[in-house]
DNA sequence: ATGGTTGGTAGCCAA
């Protein structure tokens, strides 16, 4: 089964782009971030018309995540455990049956940006990552297939940026954020794209500003982290950078994984 | 060279 994650930067501004991409690639599941709308205003119809079930966890104006799935979803949960008082909509999960007899639980997450460092936004980013790490510890104990897809807002290594020097002093490249990422890997979670390929220059985000796309000033900040039981089924991972050159693009592009299940 | 695009909103705000 093909599972994708894509920070769409406003679903109401991206209906045609996302629908065209779904028609072309036909993923079984799409995790979306930054839908930037309340659930009631999410444009469900165009995606239901393409054969997708739609579950959302939105808020007014900012943030917001969603999961689209061709197969019906079960046990949908909204909000990150340990962050129950958080008004920002950044996390949801759903259980999705595979093509055969397997089942995978999927998370769609939008981790805080955290800029600028040294502010409340930065401490919120670190607090959110701590809660996510604690939740992943609990997930790993279940020893079940689990795929956490989304915008982690972390540049883990210099190899994850075309110009790492551009990101010195940025929250995404801060020692604290990178340490949070390493702790997730040290728990035993697998970076799906890196498990599949060691190809350099793989990025998922190019800023709208300063002609970043034209200069290939990209960073890899969108990921699928897999439990070992999900990684056992991994039989492909790729970034679809074509869409960054489309009309009215998001500043992020889709990341896809294929699970043989 | 504290920059300069986009989306959603009425906060120049967040990214």
Image (cartoon, coloured by chain):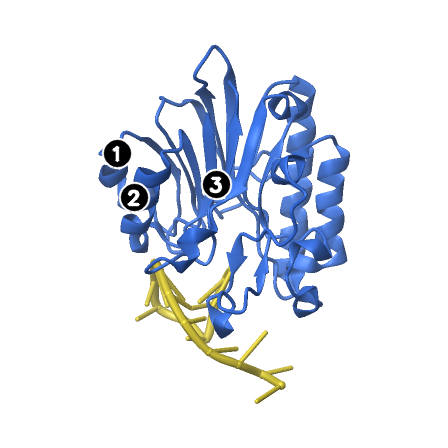
Chain colours: A blue, B yellow
Residue A80 location in percent, x, y? 56, 37
CB contact under 8 Å: marks 3 and 1: no
Q: Residue at x 72, y 46 (%)?
A: A180
Task: Say which residue label 3 marks.
Answer: A5
Task: Measure how far apart labels 3 and 2 are at the Cα level.
Answer: 14 Å
Q: Residue at x 73, y 30 (%)?
A: A188
Task: Say which residue label 2 marks.
Answer: A19
Quick one: label 3 or label 1, which is nearer the N terminus?
A: 3
Quick one: label 1 or label 2, which is nearer the N terminus?
A: 2
Residue A50 - label: 1
Q: Which residue is drawn at 30% across and 45% down?
A: A20
Residue A81 location in percent, x, y? 58, 33
Task: Measure how far apart labels 3 and 1 are at the Cα level.
Answer: 17 Å
Crowding at dot 2, Cα within 10 Å, few <14 / some 14-19 / many 20+, comes out as some
Task: Measure how far apart labels 1 and 2 are at the Cα level.
Answer: 8 Å
> In the image shown, does A186 or A25 lie closer to the viewer?
A25
> In the image shown, does A223 or A88 lie closer to the viewer?
A223
Residue A35 location in percent, x, y? 39, 48
Residues at discs 3 and 2 both on one chain = yes
Q: What element carries label 3?
A: strand
């Amino acid at each position: 089964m093909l599972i994708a994650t894509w920070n769409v930067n406003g679903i109401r501004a991206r209906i045609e782009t996302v629908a065209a991409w779904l028609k072309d690639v036909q993923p079984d599941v799409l995790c979306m971030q930054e839908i930037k709308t309340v659930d009631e205003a999410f444009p469900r119809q165009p995606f239901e018309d393409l054969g997708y079930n739609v579950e959302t966890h939105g808020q007014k104006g900012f943030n917001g995540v969603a999961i689209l799935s061709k197969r019906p979803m079960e046990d949908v949960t909204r909000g990150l455990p340990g962050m129950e008082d958080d008004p920002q909509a950044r996390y949801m999960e759903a259980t999705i049956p595979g093509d055969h007899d397997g089942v995978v639980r999927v998370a769609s997450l939008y981790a805080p940006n955290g800029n600028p460092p040294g502010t409340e936004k930065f401490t919120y980013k670190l607090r959110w990552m701590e809660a996510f790490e604690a939740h992943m510890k609990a997930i790993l104990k279940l020893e079940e297939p689990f795929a956490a897809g989304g915008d982690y807002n972390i540049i883990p290594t210099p190899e994850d940026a075309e110009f790492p020097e551009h990101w010195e002093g940025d929250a995404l490249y801060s020692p604290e954020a990178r340490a949070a990422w390493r702790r997730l890997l040290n728990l035993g979670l697998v970076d799906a794209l890196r498990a599949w390929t060691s190809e350099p220059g793989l990025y998922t985000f190019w800023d709208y500003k300063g002609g970043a796309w034209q200069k290939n000033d990209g960073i890899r900040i969108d990921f699928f982290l897999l439990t070992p039981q999900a990684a056992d089924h991994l039989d492909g991972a790729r970034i679809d950078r074509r869409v960054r050159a489309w009309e009215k693009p998001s500043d992020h592009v889709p990341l896809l994984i294929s699970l043989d299940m």
